[in-house]
Image: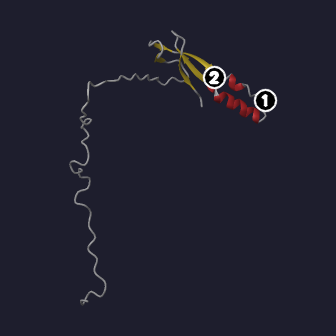
Amino acid sequence: MEKGNVGFDTAPPYPGPPMSYGAAPQPGLYPSPNAGPPNVAYLGAPTSTVTHVVVVPSLQETPGQAQCPHCQQTVVTQIERKAGLMTWGICGGLALFGCFLCCCIPFCVDSCQDVEHHCPNCHNTIHVYKRC
């Protein structure tokens, strides 16, 4: 063994930070953000499909404007309130705690019931706003 190195070698210096943080990746590693779909060769005539998506606006407690998916008319909906899960849950909870006289109250309170939106032209259901 050499003198000065008594079984311990000096560790190489710790590498410092890279020369450039946030540098762009090397070309060819990632597709450019503006690149379109890859070119694909089709055999025969290309076919296209059209998908119709019906977006129901956020109809909640009050009548709202919507396009009826049945008659394709833009209408202001008519609403009908019906007992739903929240109504029956509150009724059952009141009955469970012994309030038998009060357990019918949720059926009289509009904010405890579900709301069905109907088309005034064709009378079909457009949307149901459920409380729970």
In this rendered view, identify the residue nearer to me: 37 or 74.
Answer: 37
Q: Quadrant of the C terminus?
A: top right
Q: Is residue 58 above or below residue 93?
A: above
Residue, far front = 43
How are the colours assigned in the image? secondary structure
Give the CA separation, mark 1 to mark 2: 20 Å
Looking at the rendered structure, the kind of residue marked 1 is Phe
**Mark 1 residue element:** loop
In this rendered view, identify the residue nearer to me: 43 or 73.
Answer: 43
Q: Is residue 105 left or right of residue 20?
A: right
Residue, far left = 27
Expressed as whole percent of the image width and height from the top left, the position of residue 76 reads: 49, 14
Q: Is residue 3 left or right of residue 52?
A: left
Q: Which residue is mark 2?
A: 110
At 61% from the left and 20% from the top, the residue drawn is: 81
First-in-chain label (1 vs 2) = 1
Tell me the crowding category of disc 2: few under 14, some 14 to 19, or many 20 or more residues within 10 angstroms, Cα based. some
At 22% from the left and 60% from the top, the residue drawn is: 19
Q: Could you say which quadrant of the image residue 73 lies in?
A: top left
Expressed as whole percent of the image width and height from the top left, the position of residue 98 reads: 79, 34
Q: Is residue 99 above or below residue 59?
A: below
Q: Which mark is residue 100?
A: 1
Looking at the rendered structure, the kind of residue marked 2 is Asp
Expressed as whole percent of the image width and height from the top left, the position of residue 65 reads: 47, 17
Q: Could you say which quadrant of the image residue 105 lies in?
A: top right
Expressed as whole percent of the image width and height from the top left, the position of residue 24 reads: 23, 50
